[in-house]
Amino acid sequence: MLQPHTKSLSINDKAHSLPFGAIQGTTAEGVVSYSSDYDSVDGSQYPNRKAFRSYYDGIYMGYKWQCVEFARRWLYINLGLVFNDVSMAYEIFKLRAIRDVVNSTELPLNAFANGSLRRPEVGCMLIWDEGGEFEHTGHIAIVTEVFDDKIRVAEQNMNFTPWPAGQSYSREIEAKIGAKGDYWLKCAYTGSSILGWVIQTPDTRHSVQLPEENPALFKIKLTEHNASDCIDRPWLNIANEDEAAYVDMMKGHWLTSVEEDYFKYFAVSQSAVDSLESATDELHGLFMHATDYVLQHPELLHSFALPSAILAKVMRSWDNRNNQLITSRFDFAMTDQGLKVYEYNCDSASCYMEAGKVQGKWAWHLGIKSGDDNGADLFKALVKAWQECDVVDVQNGTIHVLQDIDPEEDYHALFMKKAIEAAGFNCVRVIGLSTLTFGEQGEILDQHGNPIRWVWKTWAWETALNQLRKEEEQEALESHQARVTQPQIVELSDVLLNDDIMVYEPLWTLIPSNKAILPVLWSLFPNHPLLLNTSFELSDELKATGYVSKPIVGRCGENIQLIDADNQVLANKGGAFAERQQIYQQLFALPKIDNYYVQICTFTAAGHYAGSNVRVDKSMIIGKDSDCMALRTLDDQAFLTL
C-alpha cells in the first residue's frame, strides 16, 4: 500500500485547501478528483483503515485519495483497464502489461522517456521519479490534452486546492519540441523529475526497453577470504550488552557455528539486490492487500484457525493500527530461474542483529574490502521506523521489550532495545514474565513497579493465543477478563491481549504471518512472478510440479515436508505443529551452493526494504539451528568475474 507523500504548502495553498475527501475537480469524462489532505481527515467519516480503501464496481482502486487511486479509477471508468498493484508510483514506469477487465485479457504497455520522439497521448499515464517533492513515492497523473507547447493533466495528491471554475483538468505542464521532434516536459519542482509517459500500445518504437535480465546475475556465489591471523582475536565489543549476549550464545566471536566456514561468505550482484529491494516493497503491499481482503471476507478467516474470541480484536487492530508495523522479514529462494517468496514473517522474526551488526563487524575485522555489507543500513532504518511510529509519548512513555528466557532472544531483544533508545525513547527490557505483577487497578507493572503501556516483543502472537485454545474460546476470554482484576500470576496473554497495552508488532500481523494467507495471495494475484502456486488442497497441478506441505502456523521449519514430482520425499522435518491445518505450495527448492542450501532473507522497516542476509543449512529446510553467514553485494561486472 502506498504511503502518502508529504508536502510543504504555501500560505496561499493552506488558506484555500479543501478537507480530505472534498471534490477538487471533475474531468471532462466525469472522473472526480478528491482532496487528500490527510491532516484534515474527519475521524467520524473515516473511523478505520477499511474506510480509506477505495473500490469502484467492487474492484480495488487504491488508497484514498492518492495519485495511484485516481489514475487507476480514470483508466477503469474510461477504458476498462486496471494495472497491477505497485508499492510506489514511479514503479508504474516499468509495468509492461495492463488488464482488460471486460475481456479478462492482458494488453501491452510501453513507456516513453521524457524527450521521446513519441509524444504523450490522451489517457496515458505521466510518471514522476522518486525524489524532491515526491520523495520515496514518485507521482502519477493522467494526460487529458496534448499540445505542441503544453499538456494538461488530471490527478490527485498534488495539492489540496480546487481546480479553477470551469476547468476539467488540474494543471498545465510546459512542453518544448527539440530539433529532431523530441518532446520534452518541464518539471516545476526542485529535486523532482518526469520519467516519461506510459501508453497502452503494442508499438515499441522509441520506447524504453527494460534491460534483459542476465540469469547469471541472480546466482548466489560462495567465496572465501584469504586466511589471516584474525581468527583468534576477539572482534565483537563485549562492553556492549547486545554483542556480549551474542558472544555468550555463540560461545565466542563467531558469525557461523562451523569453524571451517569462518572465512567464507556469500556474494550477490547489485542487480540481484535491486530486485530483492523492489520485490520486498511490492510484496509487502500485496500481503497488506490480501490481509484486508481476508478481514473483509470473514468466511476466509476459519482457514487461519484463530480463536473466535479474538477475531473482533484483530479487526480493530487492522482498522486502528494503520501503518504501525516496525519491522518484518521475507524469506526468498533466489536462483537463475527466478526469485520466489516462501512466506512473510510479519510478526516475530529473527536474525536482525546478525544482519544489521555482526556480519558487518565480521567483514571489518577480516579486512574484507570487496563489495558492500547488505545489512549496513538496517539499524538506521529501524531507528527511523521507531521515530516515525508516532504513537508513543517520547517524554512520558516507556517501551518495554518483552522476551522469553532464551540466549538467542537475549541479543535479539538487546539489539532492538538499542534501536528504540537511539530513536529517543526510554526502554526497559523484561526477561520472562515472573517479574510482572498486577497493580491495584488491574494494570500490569514491570519489575520496577511502573505500568506497561507500550511493548515490543520477541514472542509470537500465536504463543499468547495458545492460552485461549486450552479452554472453550468464550470461557477463555471471560477468564482472561476476570484474571486482570485479580492479583495472580501474569501470563503472556494478559499482556499482549490487554486493551490498555499497545503491542508491536500489531495483532493484525497474525494474518499475513499465517501461511493461510499464501493461497489467498495466489487467488488474488495468480501467476504473479514473485509468488508460488499455493492451495489449501493438494491439486494435480501441484503434484505434477512437486510441492511443499506446511502447517499454517509453525516455527523454525517444523513439520514441513518437500515432495518432488515423482512423489519422492526430498526432506521432512518433525515438530510440534503436526496437528495444524496444512497448505500446499509449489516446490521451488533453495539453491545448493557447495554443501549448503541458501535462503535469502530481506528485512523491512516500516514496510520498506532495509537490508538482507543469508541463512544456510545442509538440509533443504531452514530451521532454528540453521546458520547465518555474511552476505555482500558486488557491482554486476565484479560479480560476473568473481
Image (tube, helix red, strand yellow):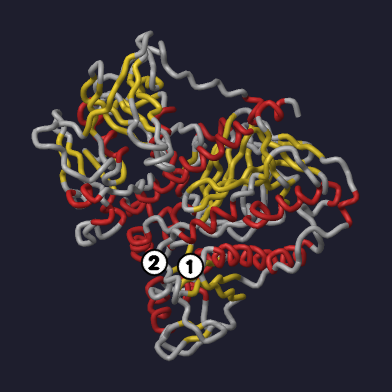
Q: Determine the residue positioned at 59% across, 52% down.
A: 378
Q: Which residue is mark 2?
A: 310
Q: Is residue 49 left or right of residue 529?
A: left
Mark 1 is surrounded, within 10 Å at the Cα level, by few (under 14), some (14 to 19) or many (20 or more) other residues, namely some
List the single residue furthest toward the left: 166
Residue 305 vertical placement versus 205 (above, below): below
**What SS does tag 2 mark?**
helix
Q: Residue at x 45, y 70 (%)?
A: 394
Q: Is residue 608 above or below residue 425?
A: above
Q: Position of residue 469 (x, y in %)?
A: 47, 69
Q: Residues within 10 Å of mark 2 (few under 14, many from 20)?
A: some
Q: Are marks 1 and 2 in contact (CB under 8 Å)?
A: yes
Find residue 511 and report its horizontal and vertical position in percent: 44, 55
For marks 1 and 2, give the CA distance: 9 Å
Which badge, 1 or 2, is on the more N-terminal residue?
Answer: 2
Residue at mark 1: 465
Q: Amino acid at mark 1?
A: Leu
Q: Please name whichever residue, 508 or 636, is drawn nearer the observer in this view of the structure.
A: 636
Instruction: Inspect the image, locate mark 2, and give the three-letter code of the amino acid beneath it.
Output: Ile
